[in-house]
Amino acid sequence: MECEICGKPVPEHNPIRAKIEGSVMVVCKDCAKLGTIQKAPPKPKFRKQEKSNRPTNTRNRSYSRNDEPSEELIEDFAFEIRKARESKNWSREDLGKKINERVSVITRIETGKMTPDIKLTKKFEKALNIKLLEKVDNIDLNQFVNSSTGERTLGNIMKIKRK
């Protein structure tokens, strides 16, 4: 088993699961420092189930490139929203009334504590006349292959910001 960030070997009998940037991943000791270590998930309790005529719910879903988002929120969205609101001399209450959102939501978004979903982002774009979504180019992931194992890891694709 390999670290999902850097590709180093992780012991299979005792893998480290860490939550990093909102995602739980199997990582090595070094990469575990980038997030918070998670407890092992509880073992499911099995119940004896009776057979029924209902079809089983399968979660096997085929993945396609069309499922990937073609637009992405810009990195400094919080600053841009606040700057645009202040340039119009609107208070957070005024903006909240225009887009039908609570002031607390606008405050959390402007401070960067919350990321707006696509629907809310489009409300901000329309009300403030700004561009918050940018087109995302499809990247050929085959160019990011670990040379030692031949597998892709997050460490091959992204740069890790050290705090």
Image: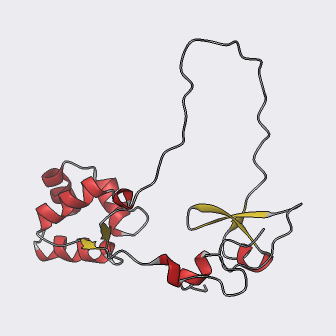
Q: Quadrant of the C terminus?
A: bottom right
Residue 99 position within the rendered picture, expressed as x and y whole percent measured from the top left: 17, 53
> x, y percentage for residue 146?
65, 83
Decide which of 62, 109 is in the foreground and name it: 62
Which image quadrant is residue 17 in? bottom right
Q: Give the color scheme: rainbow, by chain, secondary structure or one colour.
A: secondary structure
The residue at 13%/67% (across/down) is 128
In this rendered view, identify the residue nearer to me: 90 or 24. Answer: 24
Location of residue 160 in the rendering, given as x and y in whole percent from the top left corner: 58, 84
Q: Quadrant of residue 3?
A: bottom right
Nearest to the observer: residue 143 or residue 124: 143
Give the x, y percent position of residue 86: 17, 74
Does 139 sit left or right of 1 as displayed? left
Residue 38: which quarter of the image? bottom right
| 27 relative position to 156: left or right | right
Q: Residue furthest right?
A: 13
For residue 116, above or below residue 34: above
Q: Residue at coordinates 77% horizontally, 21% vertically from top-left? A: 47
Image quadrant in which the N terminus is located: bottom right
Residue in view at x 56 percent, y 62 percent: 22
Count of all numbered marks drawn on residues in the image: 0
Q: Residue at x 61, y 81 (%)?
A: 155
